Structure formats: structure tokens, C-alpha cells
Image (cartoon, grey):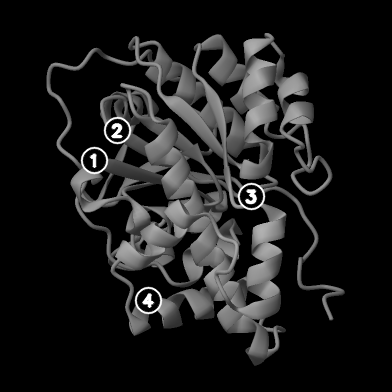
């Protein structure tokens, strides 16, 4: 679940960000993107790309969202990853787009010097679903910055069991433990269920919604486990859909309380007209949001995803 509809439908309160080290090296300057602007949710102000790069560089867990089919989001995140690398830091880069079942092959490919194409093959990337090579800039950036790439998503086999049975049978015990430790309320469950309904054009059967909610939570907990397990001394970067980087409902919920040094950045779409409105982006986000920063970019042309959906 991701994209503008799911990410903007029910944005709620952001929690605190870890303190940034004042003496940290500065990241390389990023060029501004035409028609794009970055909103600092907590400060209620726009900032420049190089300021964002400098702020996220010293944080342990940097969660970078996306609208999956917007090329600008992948390009901008690749530049941000390289800016972090320019400070001398070498965090792990964990991708939603790789299932954990392919982690061993992904590591072997990196040890063999594979390029981005080779990594996509080794990690069994679903090229059609993820519209490869849209994510290639991120893999290229990680390789240039000498950052290890890791899988983050729960396997299809595990998620299939969840969807069929509504149970956690066969789920990685470490992921189950993160689910058990997390603080999760009925209000959060209802919020996530509504987000899932909206992202499926309100055409889901009600019987399927609880299982989709559980599957989403398993995926988020799996990504949190991958971040914690694969983090280097410089931490980790998560590359995932906007719905997975929300502080209130997603991956941050499952990162241990002692490791709350987290920053969440969403990439959302907005037209030039919308961005000129005097109350933008508060109109888009409400008074509060589940992200620390939101990088608004122009929308891409696409068909209505609800057309033809049964």
C-alpha cells in the first residue's frame, strides 16, 4: 500500500526525531528540482534540499518514501543517498522492493561486484510490478557510495499464509517478536484499515480488510527487523512506499524504543496550482502529519487506478 491516495488520506501526528549531531560533516549540496518543494512538518516551513540532506545524514534510521511510479521520487532519493555518502557515512540501504527470501543471493551478487541490473536479477525483483528500471538510480547510488544493499520485505510465501489464514504461522520469529512488542491500538488498526480501503478504491470485501491490515503490519515489522539487523555503524536507509514510512502506523512503530533515532521523509505529488495556494501544504496534510518532512513534486500522468477495478 502506498501512493498519494493512501499516504495523504489519513495523515496524523508525527512523533519526535532524534537529536542531530551539531558537529556532523555536511552533506554535499543537492540541486533544486523544478516545481518541487520540501516541507518541514515540525517547523511548518519550507527548506532547501541541501538542508534536508544535512539533517538526515547523522540520523540512524532514515526512512524514504515514494509514489512508486514517479521517476522523480527515485532520482531525488538517489541524490539524497549520495549526499549522505558524501559525508563519509556508509549506512545499509534496505529496499521494500526486494523480498527477504532473496537476501542471500543479493549478498552473494554484491560480493561478486554485480551492477544494478545484476542486483535486480539476484534479488528476484518483480520487474513488472515495480516497473524496473524506475528504482535503478537508487541501486546505482548505493553502489557508487559503497553502501550495502539489503532486502526488506516479507516473502510472498509468508504473506500468502497471512492472507489465507489470518494467522502468523510461519512468520519469522524475530518479526513476530517485533509485532508483539509494538504498541498497537484499536485506533491505529482502524486508521490502517481505512487507509487500505481507500488505496483499493473502497472496493474491498470487508472480510478481506483485517487480513490485509495484518499483512501490512507483517511487512512493516519485517522491514523494521531488516533495518535493525543489517544496519552498519552508520545506521540504515529504508526505501519504501510512503505508507511504510509513516511514524504513526508503519515501520517506526516496530523499531525498538531504544532506537528511536528516526527521520521519515515522504514524497507526495502536488500540482503547481495547488502549491501556489496560500494555505498549502497545510491543506494537503492537515495540521499534523505522520512524516517529519514531505517533498512535494509535480504529479506524473497516469490512468485512474480505480478504473477497471472490480
Q: Residues within 10 Å of mark 1 (few under 14, many from 20)?
A: some
Q: Residues within 10 Å of mark 4 (few under 14, many from 20)?
A: some
**Sequence order check, earlier mark of 3 and 4:** 4
Residue that label 4 marks: 188
**Sequence order check, earlier mark of 3 and 1:** 1
Q: Is residue 32 above or below residue 162?
A: above
Looking at the image, can residue 262 be seen? yes
Residue that label 3 marks: 299
Looking at the image, can residue 266 be seen? no
Name the residue nearer the viewer: 7 or 158.
158
State the mark number for residue 60. Answer: 2
User: Are the residues at dot 2 and dot 1 in contact (C-beta closer than 8 Å)?
Assistant: yes
The reply, left or right, for residue 84 in relation to residue 116 is left
Q: Is residue 204 above or below residue 120?
A: below
Looking at the rendered structure, the secondary structure element under dot 4 is helix
Q: CA distance from mark 4 to mark 1?
A: 22 Å
Q: CA distance from mark 3 to mark 4?
A: 29 Å
The reply, left or right, for residue 245 in relation to residue 117 is left
Instruction: Name the residue at 32% across, 64% down.
Output: 182
Name the residue nearer the viewer: 96 or 154.
154
The quadrant of the rendering that contains the N terminus is bottom right
Residue that label 1 marks: 261
**Sequence order check, earlier mark of 4 and 1:** 4
Front of the two marks 3 and 4 = 4
User: What x and y, as percent, mark residue 132?
Assistant: 78, 36
Name the residue nearer the viewer: 45 or 145.
145
Q: Residues within 10 Å of mark 3 (few under 14, many from 20)?
A: some
Q: Is residue 84 above or below residue 213?
A: above
Amino acid at each position: 500500500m502506498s501512493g498519494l491516495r493512501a499516504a495523504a488520506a489519513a495523515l496524523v501526528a508525527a512523533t519526535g526525531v532524534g537529536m542531530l549531531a551539531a558537529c556532523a560533516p555536511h552533506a554535499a549540496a543537492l540541486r533544486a528540482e523544478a516545481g518541487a518543494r520540501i516541507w518541514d512538518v515540525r517547523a511548518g516551513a519550507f527548506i532547501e534540499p541541501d538542508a534536508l540532506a544535512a539533517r538526515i545524514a547523522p540520523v540512524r534510521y532514515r526512512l524514504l518514501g515514494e509514489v512508486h511510479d514517479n521517476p522523480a521520487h527515485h532520482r531525488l532519493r538517489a541524490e539524497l543517498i549520495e549526499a549522505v555518502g558524501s559525508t563519509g557515512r556508509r549506512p545499509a540501504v534496505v529496499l521494500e522492493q526486494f523480498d527477504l527470501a532473496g537476501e542471500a543471493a543479493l549478498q552473494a551478487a554484491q560480493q561478486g561486484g554485480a551492477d544494478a541490473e545484476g542486483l535486480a536479477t539476484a534479488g528476484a525483483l518483480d520487474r513488472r510490478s515495480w516497473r524496473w528500471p524506475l528504482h535503478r538510480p537508487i541501486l546505482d547510488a548505493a553502489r557508487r557510495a559503497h553502501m550495502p544493499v539489503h532486502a526488506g520485505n516479507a516473502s510472498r510465501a509468508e504473506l500468502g499464509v497471512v492472507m489465507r489464514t489470518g494467522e502468523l504461522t510461519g512468520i519469522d520469529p524475530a518479526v513476530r517478536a517485533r509485532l508483539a512488542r509494538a504498541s498497537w491500538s484499536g485506533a491505529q488498526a482502524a486508521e490502517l484499515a481505512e487507509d487500505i480501503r481507500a488505496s483499493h478504491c473502497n472496493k474491498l470485501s470487508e472480510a478481506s480488510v483485517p487480513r490485509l491490515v495484518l499483512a501490512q503490519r507483517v511487512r512493516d515489522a519485517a522491514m523494521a527487523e531488516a533495518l535493525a539487523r543489517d544496519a552498519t555503524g552508520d545506521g540504515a536507509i529504508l526505501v519504501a512506499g510512503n505508507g511504510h514510512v509513516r511514524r504513526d502506523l508503519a515501520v517506526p512503530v516496530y523499531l525498538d524504543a531504544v532506537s528511536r533515532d528516526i527521520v521519515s521523509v515522504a514524497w507526495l505529488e502536488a500540482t503547481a496550482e495547488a502549491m501556489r495556494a496560500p494555505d498549502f501544504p497545510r491543506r494537503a496534510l492537515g495540521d499534523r502529519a505522520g512524516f517529519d518532512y514531505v517533498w512535494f513534486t509535480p504529479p506524473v500522468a497516469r490512468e485512474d487506478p480505480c478504473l477497471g477495478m472490480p
